[in-house]
Amino acid sequence: MSVDESVVSGSKAAARLRAAAIEAFAANGFGATTTREVAARLEMSAAAMYPHYKSKEELLFAIAYEGHQLTLEWLQAADPVGEAPADRLRAVVGEFAKNQATHHARARVVEYELAALTDEHFRVIAGLRRDVVRLVRRIVQAGADDGSFAVPDVEGVTLAIVSLCVDVCRWFPGGTYTEPDTVAKLYPELAIRLAGAHS
Amino acid sequence: MSVDESVVSGSKAAARLRAAAIEAFAANGFGATTTREVAARLEMSAAAMYPHYKSKEELLFAIAYEGHQLTLEWLQAADPVGEAPADRLRAVVGEFAKNQATHHARARVVEYELAALTDEHFRVIAGLRRDVVRLVRRIVQAGADDGSFAVPDVEGVTLAIVSLCVDVCRWFPGGTYTEPDTVAKLYPELAIRLAGAHS
Amino acid sequence: MSVDESVVSGSKAAARLRAAAIEAFAANGFGATTTREVAARLEMSAAAMYPHYKSKEELLFAIAYEGHQLTLEWLQAADPVGEAPADRLRAVVGEFAKNQATHHARARVVEYELAALTDEHFRVIAGLRRDVVRLVRRIVQAGADDGSFAVPDVEGVTLAIVSLCVDVCRWFPGGTYTEPDTVAKLYPELAIRLAGAHS
Amino acid sequence: MSVDESVVSGSKAAARLRAAAIEAFAANGFGATTTREVAARLEMSAAAMYPHYKSKEELLFAIAYEGHQLTLEWLQAADPVGEAPADRLRAVVGEFAKNQATHHARARVVEYELAALTDEHFRVIAGLRRDVVRLVRRIVQAGADDGSFAVPDVEGVTLAIVSLCVDVCRWFPGGTYTEPDTVAKLYPELAIRLAGAHS
DNA sequence: AATGAATGAGGCTTCATTCAT
DNA sequence: CATGAATGAAGCCTCATTCAT
């Protein structure tokens, strides 16, 4: 499965526009970024975006859709479904944290700029967000069920693990953490602790 | 100690403007919020803000300053300095999480809209943010030092605990968590787990 | 009865804007006239129109509404209701033609630029237009009924008389007709002929 | 004599473009119609117009030129030159009114959208317009000269007859008049009345 | 302190048109 | 010929801010 072409154009110019917009939106916010700024990063005219996206909001939607879709795919691909919950949690959280760090600009847009979407577009994205949480919840639940996790509250722990991963894009790089791999090593251990797994 | 009057006006109208701006900025982002929108929430004219704040950015600064100052004060007040690190951590994280939930609109502004500040104002706020992290780090360090916490990496665990608290304002209210008190009960336990404290 | 204040603002600036817009729209058409052009005629900034009219279309609507309302009032005031149909027709057509000539710029906007109105605004204007035709039709009908007019087709003759008057704004001033009064003398006689009145 | 090929291309694609443009310009005005809209009516790309017309204005000119030329030809062909003025007037006005009704979309463009032409193009069209008026004036003058018309003012009556015919395209179809033939029956009689012809 | 009007700057978008394919 | 992408210019409108009242 891959990103839906009907929403996220595969054309080269469209992809470059998304990349430029991600940098700009992440740095200044969607509302404070002008279409000119995005185009200027590619040395294109201000109008060059419009054959590819009908509006600035559609550009944001394409970014948000692709971002969520990719996250979902990556987490699904990283999840060793048949194995022990602790191993699954480590794998998924490592992947999640690493990607939030690696793609922190995109992630910031994807996490914090959704208020500018139309209601309809927002609903589409909200659906993908729920899928991500569900994926993590299933693992936490599996550990709770087989007794390998000591979880007082599946919902709360799931929320916390996802929250921890999501927030990486806000602060990364920061403090002594400047490499995605360092984050990818720390976070699985943190998640295991939150889950109360027998070490 | 209280919020610095020279930055955050104590006048009633100024306070109402901050409150209205917090709601608007939280909902739509600073860049996408107009001064008219803020004024309209108070049924004032767009020009009525200017006797109180020199600019929209000054209004944001006042909000950010007050928000950080209050958080810092509350955490300091909640920290039972002489007691065991685990108890201190519980107390501080409980307070932090509860306040991020209770004041999630203000917290969102304070956490995510700082890019619009002038460099000078940003530096002031960044200083306050460092104070908050330092407060948590001292507790984690104390626990690491006296052996009551099993912390592989003081910096990383501090980062994670703060990150977890900060991110509350992004998702709260959400899932089954709709009361600040419920969050205030869960989060101290999560922090204790992250710190690897002997229960 | 006078022009409805809730649609056509009585403020001085609003009236000056309508006057400037009439000249510009008449000369170049609504679609080809820019808001800057209108403002420039008053040596105002391009944005100065917006406290008075929410959009260019609202400005057009105010002009169209006022124009139709005034025409209707003038014709009603000019109609000597109790007298002979021929005298009424002369009076009304003289007034109509004179006003279309005197205010030919406004009339052009009012007659030819309505396609740019929103559907709702168009319906309001269409109602006023029907009232004007009805006023003329009643006179023609009265003459047909009392035998003072020889009208083969009340509807057709009404249409023709109104058509003749309306079209004045298209060509006036033109040929040897450069004074509204000259038109005001010719047109009643033409209408009488169209109505087949006993001279 | 036929329409000048050097101005109005006879190619099929060019003719379809004119037809599509007439509908669009008539509905929304030249200024408010985009080249894309015209092309879209033919399911062509926006650029497809340019091999046929150098610009939007040239397309308008071709339409206006062809429209006026055809009107002139039709009126000339309809005029039974040697016969009585009354018969000539009836024939010419019947043809004129019928054509304004039949081709009311084209006529609207031709009558009301000329302001967008370049000065040079406008002069060409204005020449054709004068020819049309001259054709009618000659008939009115002939009737005045031989005493068969009772015309107080040749210029005024000519103006009125042409005005009546021109304006058909503004209101047709309307009221109970929905067929060109009905108009073609009414209008000669109206013209005869305006001319004060002995019936 | 508060307002309505005004403004200069600029934002998003559209447009007529060109160009490489 | 026809097209999709690109562009410079411009259009409508909004915005933060000022000013006279």
Image (tube, coloured by chain):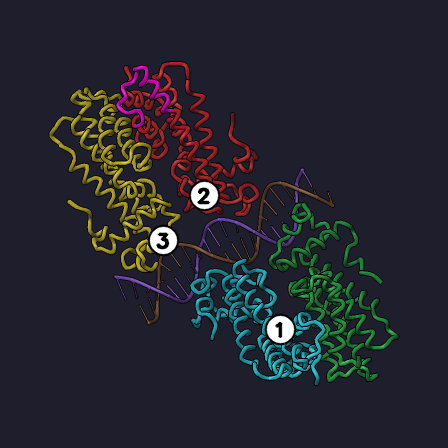
Chain colours: A red, B yellow, C cyan, D green, E purple, F brown
Labelled disc at residue B192: none
Disc 2 and disc 3: Cα gap in Å? Answer: 19 Å
Say whether residue C122 is magenta: no
Residue occupying the point 16% across, 22% down: B146
Check the residue under mark 2 and report the chain it is in. Answer: A
Asked whether D63 or B130 is in front, the reply is D63
**Left or right of residue D147: residue C82:** left
Labelled disc at residue C137: 1
Q: Which residue is mark 3?
A: B37
**Left or right of residue D141: residue C160:** left
Question: Label 1: how many residues lie within 10 Å, few (<14), some (14-19) or many (20+)?
Answer: many
**Contact check, label 3 and label 1, Cβ < 8 Å:** no
Q: Is residue A91 above or below residue A101?
A: above
Asked whether C48 or C181 is in front, the reply is C181
Say whether residue A144 is magenta: yes
| Magenta stretch in the rendered image | A136-155
Q: Residue D45, how many percent across, how many down?
A: 66, 45
Q: Which residue is mark 2?
A: A118
**Contact check, label 2 and label 3, Cβ < 8 Å:** no
Residue type at numbered disc 1: Arg
Asked whether A176 or C35 is in front, the reply is C35
Question: Label 2: how many residues lie within 10 Å, few (<14), some (14-19) or many (20+)?
Answer: few
Question: Label 3: how many residues lie within 10 Å, few (<14), some (14-19) or many (20+)?
Answer: some
Residue type at numbered disc 3: Glu
Residue type at numbered disc 2: Thr
Disc 3 and disc 1: Cα gap in Å? Answer: 52 Å
